Image (cartoon, helix red, strand yellow):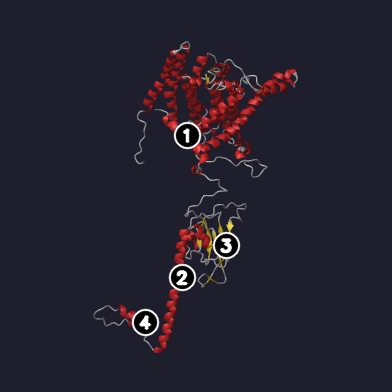
Amino acid sequence: MIAAGPDSFLERAPLALRDWAVQLLPVPLQWLAHHVITIVAVLAVFGLFFAFTTIAERKLLARLQNRLGPNRTGLPWIKGLRLFGLSQPFADAVKAITKEDIVPAAADKILHFLAPVIVVGFSLMTFAVLPFGRQYLPVDLDAALLYFFAAGAATELAIFMAGWSSRNKYSLLAAMRALAQLISYELPLILSVVPVVLVTSTLSTKAIVIAQGTWSFGLLPHWFIFTPWGFAGFIIFLIAALAESNRSPFDLPEAESELVAGHLTEYSGFKYALFFMAEYFGLTALSGLGVTLFLGGWQAPCAFLQFIPSYAWFMMKLIGMIVFFIWVRGTLLRLRIDQLTRLSWQFLVPLALLNLGNAAFWVLTAQWAGPLQLVRWIVSAAIIVVPFILMGRSLTAGFAPRTYRYAP
Amino acid sequence: MLGSGILNGLLVTAKNFVGSYYDPRRMVTVEYPEQKTALPENYRNFPFLISESATDPMGTLRCVACQICEKECPPQCIIIEKSKDKKPDATGKLQLYPAVFGIDTSVCMSCQICVEVCPFDAIKMDQVFEVAATDRFQDLFLSREQLAKPNSYFHQIHPTDAAEVDGRLSAERKAAEEKAKAAAAAKAAAAAAKPAGAPPPVSSPAAAVKPPGPAPSTPGAPAA
């Protein structure tokens, strides 16, 4: 095979390009160039990824609702060329940049300006510890997961800054609601990740991906999603990630049809676009973390598929996650604030804690073999499925099915 | 089980997603400037003037410049100037016609009151909605020439209304014709009878007024 194995040409090509560009510069500047190129590459790739996520989201949502979606934007200097509307994000960007930037007279000017900068900055910082490929980890930290959640939680500060500095009651109240939501879901999000740390006994994202890099018979990948605790953890992670990134059905902070855009009320033009961008960066980063922790990161699903470069696998899984999030957005209805917090504190947090015990059981029974292996799987599945069913029943008792007196 | 509703919902939207590529009947929207949906018959906005003939719209306007619509129009967007001369209308009767008839569509609120007050069925509601213009003063003020549209167009956009109006108008014209004919016949008969020295027909209604039974002594005959 021409391009086989971890050291194939395609796998190494971007690195080789970077090294070539770095050695053109004088030696004292090389370390700087090395990092700048990495940062620019991440910004460029995920900037474009953000642009096409927005158009993909609009087109997918339209199809999920039997509509066509945006399909007209072509190129400005060629009439009649439509490109299926793929240049829509660039038209949107031009629009956002040229719009008037309105700052309320009573606003705290500095904080009002800083909030969108900080929210984008912190959501971009989380990309530093995501392993995009076998050799593509911008910063290899030992405590990468800790760093990821620290940077991710800092965006909540920016949201409150935005709400408070606008000097607007609605902004402030919405920012407080947003904080209530984000802090409520920070807990299940982190608790759903802890089992992975428990099993791999490391916080390094690189080591976590490598721990998932084996196959049974070369076909069945040993990704954590294919274990009972991993599957449960992944579902809890998905729900918490949806809430953390303010996406439907948890898009209360800026529920378009009900509130006046929440904490974004007093933002317009490019600053609004920055918040929008940060939201997508946050979603992409959380999806990337989900891929890294549960879906095997850059590992190929089968041993013989390793000839495809590792970064391509990562991006494919990332796109799969994003498409799933868009699918959920096109399907589910928005929750009420009380339902939202109830779901977190009464359902997700207890389940995530149980799942932690489940992972502990999995680690303790690592030596079981033969028929005991089957027992291990059944017990582990029961630990999470039985409470799920019992809690589901008790929580929904008296609610469903709903009857409508005056409707057929 | 908890969550089964979410899975069912995801299935529904997935079916929509796949089906929207294969089944055009699922699509709820059309690509507007190229494709248009049929407007409902009762859809209406800005009024237009009905002319009988498509070839000579200015000569066959139903409007007789009575100015009722101008006076009734709540936002006062209609401007009419009567003509100095008279022209024969569709029935051949001499009528005034509007020398100037203008509607300011930037003021018009499409309330249809002009249509309701018009005794001549001369003004009706149109169905145009692509009325964008580059000049908000000149281009939105519609003149007599721009407002006149043939009766066949009215049939096209409001078939039920147009059939009703046409039926009523033709019935009225027929009645008028018959009345004219009867009047002419009566005149002819009167002209024929006068030389014969018949008593004047004035006495006959007076006789009908008389109550039955013994008549009071007061004679009511010269009531005419």
Give the mark nearest the N terminus, 4 or 3.
3
Q: Chain of mark 3?
A: B
* Pointer 2 local density, CA inside 10 Å: few below 14, some 14–19, many at least 20: some
CA–CA distance in space, label 2 to label 1:
63 Å
Residue A250 higher or lower than A292, as above or below: below
Q: Which-is-in-front pick, marks 2 and 3?
A: 2
Work out whether residue A333 or residue B54 is closer to the camera in this orientation and state it.
B54
Q: Which residue is mark 4?
A: B202
Residue B173 tag number: 2
Q: Which residue is mark 3?
A: B144
Farthest residue in the front direction? A1
Q: Residue at x 41, y 21 (%)?
A: A385
Which element type, helix, strand or loop, lies under badge 1?
helix
Work out whether residue A38 or residue B203 is closer to the camera in this orientation and state it.
A38
Residue A331 tag number: 1
* Pointer 1 local density, CA inside 10 Å: few below 14, some 14–19, many at least 20: many
> Do the CB atoms of the residues marked 4 and 3 lie less than 8 Å apart?
no
Residue A22 tag number: none
Q: Chain of mark 4?
A: B
CA–CA distance in space, label 4 to label 1:
87 Å
Give the mark nearest the N terminus, 4 or 2.
2
Left/right placement of residue B187 relative to residue A204 reads left
* Pointer 3 local density, CA inside 10 Å: few below 14, some 14–19, many at least 20: some
> For residue A396, which quarter of the picture?
top left
Residue A310 higher or lower than A70, as above or below: above
